[in-house]
Image: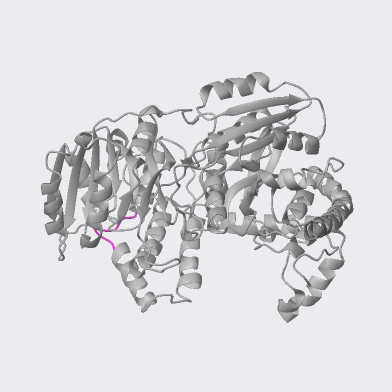
Amino acid sequence: MGPNKLITASPLEVKSTDIDTLPRILRPLRAIYRCLPIWLRSRLRSASMMIAYQFKLFLSKENQLALNALSSNRALLALPFSTPRVTPRLDITLVTFNSAKWLDGFFETLSSQDYPLSCIALYVVDHDSDDDTLVRLRDWSTRLVGLLASFDIYARDNLGFGAGQNFAIARGTSDFVLVVNPDIKFEADALTAVVSLAAADLPFIASWELRQKPYEHPKHYDPVTWETNWSSHASILLRRSAWQAVGGYDERIFLYAEDVDLSYRLRRAGYHLRYCPKAVVWHFSYAQPSEIKPTQYVGSIVGNLILRLRYGSRINKVAGFVLLCFRVLATQPIPHGRRRLLKMLIRSLRPGKSMPLLPVGELSAKVHLGFWGFDYELRREGAFVAQRKIRLNCPLISVITRTLGTRPKLLLEAGRSVMNQSYPNIEWLVIEDGGERMKAIIQDFADRTPRPVRYLPLPRLGRSAAGNEGLRCAQGTHCIFLDDDDLLYADHIESLWATLEQDSGCVAAYALSFAVHTRYRSENDSEDVFISLPSYLEQPFSYDILHNHNYIPIQAILFPRSLFVERGGFNEELEFLEDWNLWLRYAYRNRFAYLPKVTSLFRLPTESEARLSRQQKLDGAIREASEAAEAWCRHYDVISASSRSSAYSAPN
């Protein structure tokens, strides 16, 4: 079958795997499943996802409550629309242990910051290194003398990361403390970005985690507020008063999970935590993608069990040891892994002074603490998709949102996720189809944000016509559609643009998306029930499979506006599956680049009646959308052949 051959099949079939590759025992079931009506297959898929998700909740029932808390805090934790540049005195604390090879890169990028060095006080604790770490530290202290506000070095016994950081933080006096690892390099504006946000932020925000490259931490965070349920402390800005209020790091935890523990205690004390995707450090913790580091592997598992025993419910505690036995002890991904794991587990949990099972500090707020297996949060697929540095002169990208003006709350949340993008050159174009109800709201939004926002009211024309008007009015070289109830993670546009730049042979790039299964109390009031990654979306580009079913949600793809000029916009005769029809036309005799990372979220209704009604409308549009795409492709081939013939017959 050729790469552009059109096939006729249900676009809602979710598996691209050939039946012959399935285990023999499952093939009869698969054959029966394929004979079922599409509406029944849809219901079975929804039910199976719900059962699988409920099983995960059984292992930690707090998981869903923790996720829901993030979305329910959006009004409380609204991000500042702009953060004026400020440069207060800043403490930076660094703990080293045989870190000599990293120090030149660390200090070279620190000294190249656009943050004034005279406002930085540096406190370094060396944990009995036996390489050249101390020599290099003293050399850099000499080179930076008179530039930094202070540069203090302390040599101590190795009592663990938390103990070293507590000692260093206690030496300083600044309101904000940047805790960092030695194996990082700063982007030039990293300190300015994170400190400016912190200085403009709410007083009950305790920390701001910097984004790591080349491998971004894969945990979920709220795209609207950047709130997170726990923070990695490889590079994080702490509010000193919050650190003091909870007693600092728990020094009974030697290494790994001490950052999660501090995150949980801050939240239990009534504080909230933010991620700061626009402040970037390059963290060289992995020599290669998917590397399993023995110390991290063992320490992370033991740390997770300690926190389960410390904070978890009874089922959390039991589930931790079940996971240990059946998932970890049954495999051995590192040499002598079982022996090392059991040895550290026994040492960590032995009775006596070192037994770290009880938390430090008092509980003053009801919070939900998640345990997702040996993680602590829902993971975004794509942990080891390498990120690139953004070049300064990026082209303008237009984000187009169509709205009927009936969901102002959700529309503004979608707009916030656009304004939160790490990509620097964006415009948001809001197309209201059928009125001007959103005019005042969008005008107020535009007045408060530094990014360009444009509003275009239309008479009631329909979704497809409204989308085409947006494409006509877009000023960017590339476009993205964002429905008014969907959201973008901060790296969405940046990641798609980098993917396109890396593969010049592709005309568009698409990424993975979470499905947020949503219960709508009203059209403008909703509750997130659960989040999943639909398996049918995990699909490298194939035109045949794209014609079989749509695996590209509308907000997941970045494409050049020139495709609209060349191949037209939405088919205005289609009210449903207009995006699938558009991708089929844009992908015809072209290639799309696939980014296997979750960078956006879209909503699906959980109510059975709403889900069935939606499915019936989609089912009814399948043939029309497919046949319209086939007709367009045939016409395109005729026009292309005619153009080539005219070119060949033209006189010299």
The answer to whether residue 288 is visible is yes
Give the percent coordinates (x, y) of residue 448.
52, 23
Give the magenta range: 350-357
- Indicate left or right for 70 with 286 as reference: right
The answer to if 352 sits in the magenta stretch is: yes
**323 relative to 13 in the view: left or right:** left
Observer-nearest residue: 32 or 496? 496
Q: Quadrant of residue 434?
A: top right
275 in relation to 3, above or below = above
Q: Is residue 157 visible?
A: no
Q: What residue sits 23% from the left and 33% below the top?
A: 174
- In the image, 26: left or right of 118? right
Q: Nearer the viewer, residue 613 or 88?
A: 88
Q: Main secondary structure of the magenta part?
A: loop
Which quadrant would the C terminus be assigned to in this image?
Answer: bottom right
- Nearer to me, 622 or 117: 117
* Residue lying at 12% horizontally and 58% vertically, measured from the top left: 135
Q: Position of residue 229 (x, y in %)?
A: 46, 45
Magenta stretch contains residue 175: no
Provide residue 554's location: percent of width, then percent of height: 69, 46
Q: Is residue 380 left or right of residue 468?
A: left
121 in relation to 86, above or below: below
Q: Position of residue 27 (x, y in %)?
A: 77, 76
Q: Residue furthest bottom?
A: 24
How many labels sit on residues? 0
Specify the quadrant of the image occupied by residue 543: bottom right
Above or below for 52 versus 203: below
Q: Residue at x 27, y 32 (%)?
A: 175
Residue lying at the far top in this picture: please name it. 440
